Amino acid sequence: MYDLNVIENAVKKVVEEMNITAKTSAKDDYVKIGVSQRHIHLSREDLDILFGEGYELTPKKVLMGREFASNEVVTLVGPSLKAIENVRVLGPVRKNTQVEISRTDTFVLKVSPPVRPSGEIKGSEKIVVVGPKGSVYLKEGVIIANRHIHLTPEFAESLNLKDNDYVDVVIDGVKPTKFYDVQIRVRDDFNVEMHIDTDDANSSGLKNGDVVHIITK
């Protein structure tokens, strides 16, 4: 027969150890990971062509700031004439359409997009986007998003960082890794989170919610 007092004391000890570990790992220079799947941001004009005049995106999941993942998806077609379907549209609409894919996706589509910060699409790769009501030929707009970290002003100040600074990031885990020159983005409606694509996540063994350590320059 089990001694309930012994069991209760053992459980308390485990809980205390877990709390100590959590407090130790919750350092000020640690941020959590958000793995970014391939997606597209649409301009008002392209949204009308792809989904119909006056169409409005319907939110599926709230992201950070003003952004949301919508229920709407499109198909990407590159020079290979092979398609990648069910590419999520993120809202709200933007001034310019932007497609963000991984390096692995480029092997399917046969495109060569540059690695860029979000919004910097001048001279980037071309692609065809197909929606339920029409298609759009983008003369530019396809990029591989650079590694970046979203910070609140308070968090950035605590590390003496500002918008567009660059830091290194250390990953402790089953595949210890160091990412160099990760861009800092600061805005008051951001969550504290580092965004990487699926290729970086797979190569370093990271998943949503894991934490990484910022090394300031």
Image: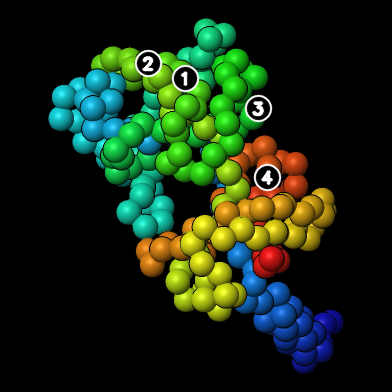
Name the image quarter holding residue 82.
Answer: top right
Q: Are marks 3 and 1 in contact (CB under 8 Å)?
A: no
The residue type indicated by label 2 comes to: Tyr
Label of residue 104 in the image: 3
Which residue does the numbered mark 1 point to in the structure image?
126
Q: Nearer the viewer, mark 2 or mark 3?
A: 2
* Residue 177 seen in the current view: yes
Instruction: Tell me which numbered mark, 4 or 1, is placed earlier along the sequence.
Output: 1
Q: Nearer the viewer, mark 3 or mark 1?
A: 1
* Residue at x-position 63% and y-position 39%: 198
Q: Are marks 2 and 1 in contact (CB under 8 Å)?
A: yes
Pointer 3 local density, CA inside 10 Å: few below 14, some 14–19, many at least 20: few
The answer to which of 159 and 81 lies nearer the viewer is 159
Instruction: Tell me which numbered mark, 2 or 4, is placed earlier along the sequence.
Output: 2
Instruction: Tell me which numbered mark, 3 or 1, is placed earlier along the sequence.
Output: 3
The answer to which of 215 and 29 lies nearer the viewer is 215
What secondary structure is found at the residue carrying circle 1? strand
